[in-house]
Image: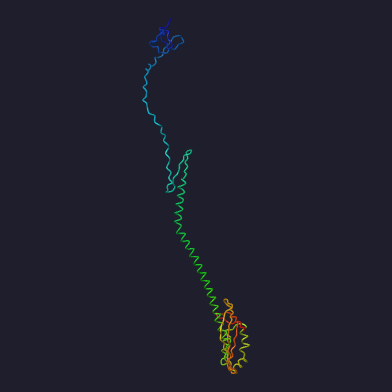
Amino acid sequence: MSDPDDTPTGDQGGPAAPAGGTAVPAPGANRTRFATPGGRSRFSAPPAPPVPPTTAEPAPPTTAEPAVTLAPAEPSVTPARAEPVAAAVERVGGSRRIEPDRAERGDRAERAEQVESRGNSPRLILAGLGALAVVLAVLVAFLAQTLSRSGNQEDRRQEALDASRDNVRTILAYDYRHLDQDYAAARAVITGPLRKEYDTTAATKKMSQDRVALKASLSSEVLNAAIETSDADRATALVFVNRSVRGSVFATPQVTLDRIEMTMVRQHGTWLVEKLQMR
């Protein structure tokens, strides 16, 4: 016995399409038939009705705009100094490298050098003036010391020259009326071995008696004198002297021209005759 639903169907289980026509699906043809073990068919619940096809309306033409890619905002670089620094920022692998502009860097260095030179100019001038003042002070002190030494040496030389004139007049002089005073004055300007020699030749007792008996006197006139050598405490002088001797035995004074070399030393601020020699 056949199942009333076992009607020959096409591929989807419906009646076969007549030749040369379009198959019309029978009611419930869209149900899927499943075979059962007893050879009978069981139909599942009918599926949802198909969605009628819709005609797609063409999309209005749009004008293609170029894609705009926004570059990530670069963080602002604040220069370390107040002066603007022109820098070329290059992004390499996510890192930044700042290269100062060489020309601006050179200008900045030049300006800094100019400012520093202007600031140092007064200091350099003051330092130069100070050094010049020190040099001048040293030079003045040296010249003053040299002039003082030269002045002192010249003064000593003049003192020795004056002493040579006075000393020779004192030594080569006496008067029978005051022999003891004349001898004392001569000893006062003589020092060293010359004093002993004077006492043994010119100031002896016998010489004093003869001078009194002859009423003799001696005076000396210095014609010229010069210092041959000198230092701080010693000098040698050459003196030209006219010795004049008077006495009862002479009708006229006896004059003798002598050239005397005197060696003098300075003791306690006074020039004394250490040696006397006739030339």
Q: Quadrant of the image for the N terminus? A: top left
* Left or right of 20 on screen, residue 245: right
State whether residue 9 is above or below residue 57. Answer: above
Q: Position of residue 228 (x, y in %)?
A: 59, 78
**Depth order, front residue of 14/92:** 92
**Depth order, front residue of 107/194:** 107
Q: Quadrant of the image for the C terminus? A: bottom right
**Depth order, front residue of 211/248:** 248
Q: Quadrant of residue 241?
A: bottom right
- The way the protein has been coloured in the rendering is rainbow
Q: Position of residue 44 (x, y in %)?
A: 41, 14
State whether residue 47 is above or below residue 18. Answer: below
Q: Position of residue 128 (x, y in %)?
A: 48, 61
Q: Quadrant of residue 248?
A: bottom right
State whether residue 80 is above or below residue 264. Answer: above
Number of labels in the image equals 0
**Depth order, front residue of 89/48:** 89
Q: Position of residue 124 (x, y in %)?
A: 47, 59
